[in-house]
Amino acid sequence: MNNDRTTQALVEAALELGFDLAGVAPLAPPPDAQRFRDWLAAGNHGHMDWLERQADRIADPRRVLPEGTAILVVGLGHARAPGTLADGGRVARYALGRDYHNVVGKKLRRLARRLRGSLGVGRVRSIVDAGPVLERSHGAVAGLGFPSKAANLLHRRFGPWFFLGELLVEIEGYEPEPAAPALGSCGTCTACIDACPTAAITAPGQVDARRCISYHTIESPELAPRDLRVDMGRWAFGCDVCSEVCPFGHRAPDGAATFGEHPGLAGARLADWLELDEEQARAQFEGSPLRRPGAAGLARNAAIALGNGPDEAGREALLRALERHPAPMVREAAAWALAHGHGADHGVRAALERALARESDPAQRAGLEADLDGAD
């Protein structure tokens, strides 16, 4: 088998189906496998326990598809204009349209069907983001980009604004070589490190999820620590700061048409998110990444963002949430937001005192007492 021709055929098939980038890497542990294990050992993954459970498969993709011989890595650009809710809340750009898991996943399934039976392709495993592979490290080996100081993959044209997906393939006799390294380098630039609002980029290429806004607004089941809340600003879902300041991303082609505009965000306000129950949240954000944190997670995020950008409508919504939201985490977030954003308001202080009188949980009481102290 001619390895170069097989590689070229795989790449061409991916590009013909609409992917912007494609490359092939050997099915083997990627360069960052040990760094990933060290990152886990340091606890940088926070509550993302599945990373520990899947660590062996993530570090060695041969455990995912033992018969496999190669990884076809693809990229799909998603750069677009920033998204701001009607009352100033920020949503990461990738979440403004259809869920990329669905868009990229559908393309990968079409690609898998095309490849099966051709080029000697046998078994295939499709992965989009949540699957157990170190996709950025494999992407670098496949020549799709170079590692950045913000721990993502950069491309000279698309910058950090592209999604990755993978097909693990079985092709008898095919043993691809690593691609030529992608052109480009961060050089002496530290824009992402300097701009990160919560200092989550602790060293070049090293992100502590426990300090990351995206982690706290999407993945974490808990309320962010007090010392991070002010720095989370108006971000209600995800964070784009490290990508926005990256010089490689400033001229990335607009990919909004590929993902569209999700109707659940049309005219949306942070105050409305505080009122959603689980069924309403699922319905409003059907086919959107915003379903990930659930109704309570969205309400928690909205409360913090409203505390960092206080207005009258937000105040009223926060008071209602403090009074009757079923999730303790949301009530605690509302209390903090009211104390931080409206602490001088006598009505707010009275509401916090009533909440403290109702609360029996020791941890919640401690939080309310701290909020009352902060409202002085």
Image (spheres, rainbow, N blue to C red):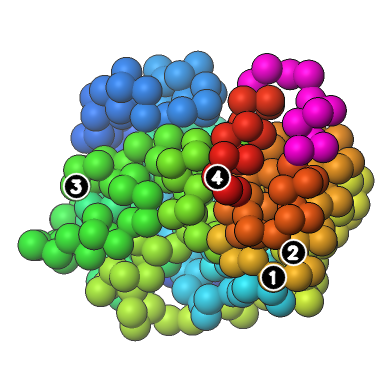
Q: Is residue 122 above or below residue 39?
A: below
Label 3 belongs to which residue?
204
Question: Separation of disc 2 and disc 3 at Cα?
Answer: 38 Å
Q: Is residue 35 above or below residue 63?
A: below
Residue 316 occupies quadrant: bottom right
> Taking 290 as reference, is 143 left or right?
left
Q: What segment carries the magenta color?
A: 353-363
Residues packed near mark 4 inside 10 Å, few (<14), some (14 to 19) or many (20 plus): few
- Is residue 362 in the magenta section? yes
Work out whether residue 181 or residue 301 is closer to the camera in this orientation and state it: 301
Label 1 belongs to which residue?
311
Contact, mark 2 vs mark 4 (Cβ under 8 Å): no
Residues packed near mark 2 inside 10 Å, few (<14), some (14 to 19) or many (20 plus): many
Q: Nearer the viewer, mark 1 or mark 3?
A: 1
Q: Which mark is residue 374?
A: 4
Residue type at tag 2: Gly
